[in-house]
Image (cartoon, helix red, strand yellow):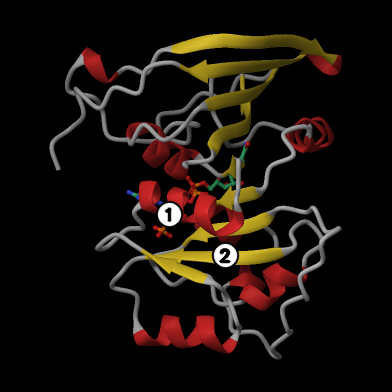
Amino acid sequence: MKPRVILHNAVSADGRMDWFRPNLEAYYELAGRFEEDVTLVGSGTLLGSPEGETISREPDEIIEARKADSVDDRPILAVPDSGDRVKNWVYLRSLPFWRDVFALSSSTASPEQIDRFKRQRVPYFLSGRTKVDLAASLSAIGGRFGAKTIRVDSGGTLNGALLREGLVDEISLLIHPQYVGGISPRTLFRAEDLTAADGVIDLELAGNETLAGGLIWLRYNVITKSLIGLPED
Ligand SMILES: NC(=O)c1ccc[n+]([C@@H]2O[C@H](COP(=O)([O-])OP(=O)(O)OC[C@H]3O[C@@H](n4cnc5c(N)ncnc54)[C@H](OP(=O)(O)O)[C@@H]3O)[C@@H](O)[C@H]2O)c1
């Protein structure tokens, strides 16, 4: 069964993800409440982080995967990376946030990439011709790890692909009292423009809290996942 997919993002009051000053303490405190089995992180988010350079180069040494530990309830880190940009999986595995990693790539992954997964003993799943098939990957995550909840920690690109494919169940937004503006698409939902209103996603308000510092935490359930009105491939 497909796990429940939750997008959790910090945004400015005009829906942007750039320039504003996120309250990271509040963001991660709320993220922790989801107690996800798997954190799905966009490759753009990992590579754009301060550790991006380390993540994009081959590791100096191979660190063995931790032995399965029944009391380790940390989530698995899953990363769609059809472009073979993440090269240091052992570094990601060594971080304290996750108990192991899971690589998602396309079925046309290069032999070098498969070799890298094997050398670094990274479990992986191949799907999709050029980009990762997200629906198939979510099912594989559910089957392999028995995952019931996936929290997505990504920018607007992965959010957009998941939303347009009707794969999101819940949206959690931490809205900051800041306005950014701009015409570049650095919003929390990056996707092709619709061609008809049928593609609009209807939401049901599931929670609404005002937090310290003028932050607002909104939670929505996705109630329609219409694929009509989307641009032709
Ligand atoms: N404010 C917040 O809450 C928050 C949270 C997280 C990140 N961020 C920020 O977001 C920025 C990065 O965002 P981003 O939008 O550039 O990148 P991103 O969403 O983090 O990464 C793009 C991901 O989408 C995948 N993808 C793209 N098109 C796809 C498709 N058609 N089918 C399947 N998968 C697809 C890519 O896979 P491939 O590699 O296979 O193409 C990649 O894993 C960073 O600046 C980060 O700090 C903000």
Q: Residue at x 55, y 25 (%)?
A: 170
Quarter the C terminus occupies: top left
The answer to whether residue 109 is visible is yes
Q: Residue furthest left?
A: 232
Whether the residue carrying mark 2 lies under 8 Å from ligand 1 is answered with no
The answer to whether residue 42 is visible is no
Residue 137: mark: 1
Q: Amino acid at mark 2?
A: Phe
From the viewer's side, name the closer residue of 70 and 90. 70
Q: Amino acid at mark 1?
A: Ser
From the viewer's side, name the closer residue of 150 and 89. 150
Q: Is residue 56 left or right of residue 110?
A: right
Image quarter for residue 34? top right
From the viewer's side, name the closer residue of 176 and 71. 71
Is mark 2 in CB contact (under 8 Å) with mark 1?
no
Total number of numbered labels? 2
Q: Residue at x 49, y 70 (%)?
A: 124
Find residue 42 and report its horizontal and vertical position in percent.
52, 52
Find residue 40 and report its horizontal and vertical position in percent.
57, 50
Find residue 4 and report its horizontal and vertical position in percent.
55, 35
Label 2, on which residue? 102
